[in-house]
Image (cartoon, rainbow, N blue to C red):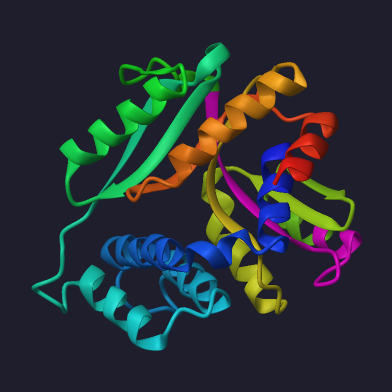
Amino acid sequence: MSGHSKWSTIKRKKGAADAKRGAIFTRLSREIVMAARDGGSDIDANFRLRLAVDKARAENMPKDNIERAIKRGSGEDKEGTVFEQITYEGYASHGVAVMVECVTDNRNRTVSDLRHALAKAGGNMGEIGSVGWQFERVAYFSFSSAAMNYDKAFELGIEAGANDVVDDNGTIEIVGPVETFKIIADRLHAAGVQPEEAGLRMLPKQEMELSVEDTMQVMKALESIEELDDVQNVFSNLKVSEDALAALEEAA
């Protein structure tokens, strides 16, 4: 499992998410809106929406909030805010490449906030294509081996067209081409497995390793970007070593 994923898991276990429940609900609501806009309001037919709703329920988002977000996305609520999904590229300090996925109703505000956050972190915004070539878009799933053991997960993943299935200390990760996302999602759903994380990710083709001190500096900067209102996901080519992960956990 990547250091970024481990760090996300550690933060969840420490309850850091609870302190920012409102921000989490906003992010989840926007994901539901975009999923419903792109694939319709039928949860059974729209796998992206189903996963977004499942994730919202796991975070105890109120049912009314979920239904309102679906209606806004599907167009049933004509007075809802219009969102657009945009991916920005740039660099954090030490030349670490960054891809930032945003959902926004005000592109100018989003660009301004992101540019400021990157500059504050010693980085800068990049032109379209300046960073993207260093990443590959993939379908990604992770869940506890308690939900499904490695052998069964491996068989499920490979039969569904995944490129890789790994078990890292009790966490199963399945990675495959973008076009396998629905197939894998449907098979996990049929098996009664609720992924802790599921979606399309940007994986770096080559990672950059820094010292523990520099890694912590960059990770804190990436966290500040993640906390921006319009940001949904942040991906980078930073390699988070076990030593850096331990230091981050201790400092949390």
* Image-based side of 64 in relation to 1, left or right: left
Task: Measuring from the top left, give residue 9's x and y in whole percent.
Answer: 71, 55
Task: Measuring from the top left, give residue 203's x and y in whole percent.
Answer: 59, 33
* Image-based side of 246 in relation to 70, left or right: right
The residue lying at 34 percent from left, 44 percent from top is 102
Q: Furthest-left residue in view?
A: 79
Q: To which quarter of the image does residue 132 belong?
A: top left
Q: To which quarter of the image does residue 219 belong?
A: top right
Nearest the eye: 182 or 11:
11
The residue lying at 59 percent from left, 42 percent from top is 177
Q: Is residue 1 visible?
A: no
Please tell me whether residue 95 is drawn above or below residue 78 in the rendered image.
Answer: above
Nearest the eye: 40 or 112:
112
The residue lying at 41 percent from left, 23 percent from top is 120
Task: Measuring from the top left, give residue 170's x and y in whole percent.
Answer: 87, 58
Quarter of the image where the N terminus is located: top right
- The magenta stretch is 135-153
Asked if the magenta segment contains residue 168, the reply would be: no
Q: Is residue 50 visible?
A: yes
